[in-house]
Image: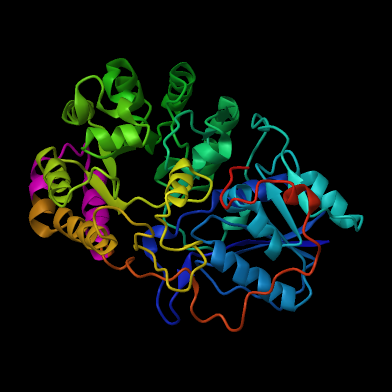
């Protein structure tokens, strides 16, 4: 049996290069490869990096789809269906909107693959593959290990992605992660994580590790044990965390000793009422944003602060205030994005119930482009989109880069180089992403749905679009 794993791009303009900062290792594909029995012949195609050889012989295709990549995933599935090759699809999007995804795949996986992937493959070999495979509970990750051999020969950014935990215990209303995992987090074995890092070190080529955990300090005691285990490895790493980490000086010191260079933290908004609507009022506790940034600087930890705009308490001046906050507080990196209502989230359901969505399914609508605001608020969608682009250009403008560079606490020459590389790259991409298509504009024909019957178990679900799985 031959299995082809495919990781779709978000979209493509024919003849144009893909956005470079989006070309990181696709860890979900490596995890799926690690779950596949050794007697199955396996190949992997990354749609962001290379053409997909649709005519190459294969027995089954597995596609991991997120909402932004759903249209392209359906295009890829259609190409294989034209050739009579069955497709199985999993990931966040099929988990959150299985009623849609099942129309473009012979089988879908709802939830995490660890509990159902061996069964699916066995059923396929026996000629009895079901339409739906649903993970009954959150599976244990204690023995999960990705197979990174599939990354060989790909020109990914030189950052090694590692997963220590999956999911997040917070309940931010715009986040598809909390909807998919119901506000829970599962952990991998720390010794297994350490061994994985040592293996990557032996292979060479990576100077920076990125823990893709959605909140690496969700369980502080467990995080401390992980950080202690990282100290002997001598690595440099970054991750994502919630803001409360900034108020634990012992934790910050331990993170620094373990090799942490910096963290991505979702600040989200300077407006308290917005934070409360997002269910992130905890962000303004214990001294507020400026104090949190000061404590990170105190421990020489770099900050990537992300902000979202388009909530009901934003005003035109909110964008400029946020830029000035970042420059005045010497923030290493910032993201200025509009809020996107992903299906299955409380935000999506609220906007849909109030009739504020501009598209029934923005991720499939031919009119939609990346960067557009797909819902109505008291600020026009065009104002929000344009203001986000202007904020990026100002923050990553020459004056801001030099000003923050002169006051930055980058601890070594390598991180100083990284500062310049990242800031200049994000300046170049400030508007490159705007108007980016979802799906390949060169795709010929229509999406081809599967001819198989709609699964009864999904028919019994509530028909409302975006219900969380």
Residue 405 position, x and y percent, is 12, 46
* Magenta span: 403-428
* Image point (32%, 67%), residue name: 434
Residue extending furthest toward the front: 354
- Identified at 69% across, 44% down, the residue is 113
Q: Is residue 411 magenta?
A: yes
Q: Which residue is found at the position 57% from the left and 74% from the top?
A: 51
Q: As rendered, which of 52 and 274 lies closer to the eye?
A: 274
Magenta: main secondary structure equals: helix
Residue 144 occupies which quadrant of the picture?
top right
Q: Is residue 172 left or right of residue 184?
A: left
- Above or below, 391 against 347 in this view is below
Q: Quadrant of the C terminus?
A: top right
Residue 107 placed where, x, y %?
Answer: 75, 57
Image x and y of residue 394, in percent: 14, 57
Residue 416 lies in the magenta stretch: yes
Image x and y of residue 206, in percent: 44, 48
- Height in image: 289 above or below 412? above
Q: Quadrant of residue 79?
A: bottom right
* Rendered view: 12 above or below 98: below
Answer left or right for 123 relative to 462: right
- Taking the spot 28% from the left edge, 42% from the top edge, the residue there is 304
């Amino acid at each position: 049996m031959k299995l082809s794993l495919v990781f779709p791009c978000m979209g493509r303009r024919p003849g144009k290069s893909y956005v470079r900062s989006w070309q990181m290792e696709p860890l979900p594909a490596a995890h799926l490869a690690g779950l596949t029995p050794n007697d199955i012949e396996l190949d992997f195609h990354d749609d962001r990096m290379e053409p997909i050889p649709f005519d190459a012989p294969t027995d089954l295709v597995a596609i991991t789809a997120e909402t932004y990549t759903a249209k392209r995933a359906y295009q890829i599935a259609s190409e294989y269906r034209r050739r009579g090759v069955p497709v199985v699809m999993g990931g966040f999007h099929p988990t959150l909107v299985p009623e849609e995804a099942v129309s473009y795949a012979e089988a879908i996986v709802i939830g995490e693959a660890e509990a159902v992937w061996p069964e699916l493959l066995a059923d396929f070999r026996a000629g009895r593959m079901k339409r739906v495979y649903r993970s009954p509970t959150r599976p244990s990750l204690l023995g999960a290990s990705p197979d990174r051999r599939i990354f060989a020969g790909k020109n990914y950014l030189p950052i090694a992605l590692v997963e220590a935990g999956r999911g997040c215990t917070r309940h931010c209303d715009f986040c598809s992660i909390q909807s998919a995992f119901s506000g829970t987090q599962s952990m991998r074995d720390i010794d297994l994580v350490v061994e994985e890092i040592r293996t990557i070190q032996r292979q060479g080529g990576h100077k920076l590790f990125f823990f893709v955990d959605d909140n690496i300090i969700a369980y502080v005691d467990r995080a401390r044990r992980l950080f202690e285990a990282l100290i002997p490895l001598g690595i440099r790493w970054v991750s994502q965390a919630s803001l409360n980490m900034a108020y634990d000086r012992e934790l910050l010191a331990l993170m620094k000793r373990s090799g942490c260079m910096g963290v991505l933290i979702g600040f989200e908004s300077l407006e308290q009422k917005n934070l409360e609507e997002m269910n992130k009022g905890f962000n303004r506790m214990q001294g507020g944003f400026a104090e949190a940034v000061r404590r990170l600087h105190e421990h020489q930890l770099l900050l990537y602060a992300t902000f979202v705009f388009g909530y009901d308490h934003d005003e035109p001046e909110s964008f400029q205030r946020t830029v000035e906050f970042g420059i005045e507080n010497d923030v290493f990196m910032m993201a200025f994005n509009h809020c996107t209502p992903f299906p299955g989230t409380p935000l999506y359901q609220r906007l849909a119930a109030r009739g504020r969505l501009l598209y029934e399914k923005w991720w499939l609508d031919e009119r939609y482009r990346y960067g557009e605001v797909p819902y109505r608020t008291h600020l026009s969608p065009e104002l929000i989109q344009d203001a986000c682009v202007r904020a990026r250009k100002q923050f990553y403008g020459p004056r801001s880069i030099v000003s923050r560079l002169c006051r930055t606490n980058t601890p070594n020459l390598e991180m100083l180089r990284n500062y310049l590389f990242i800031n200049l790259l994000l300046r170049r991409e400030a508007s490159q992403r705007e108007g980016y298509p979802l799906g390949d504009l060169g795709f010929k024909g229509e999406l081809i749905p599967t001819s198989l019957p709609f699964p009864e178990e999904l028919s019994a679900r509530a028909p409302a679009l975006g219900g969380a799985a």
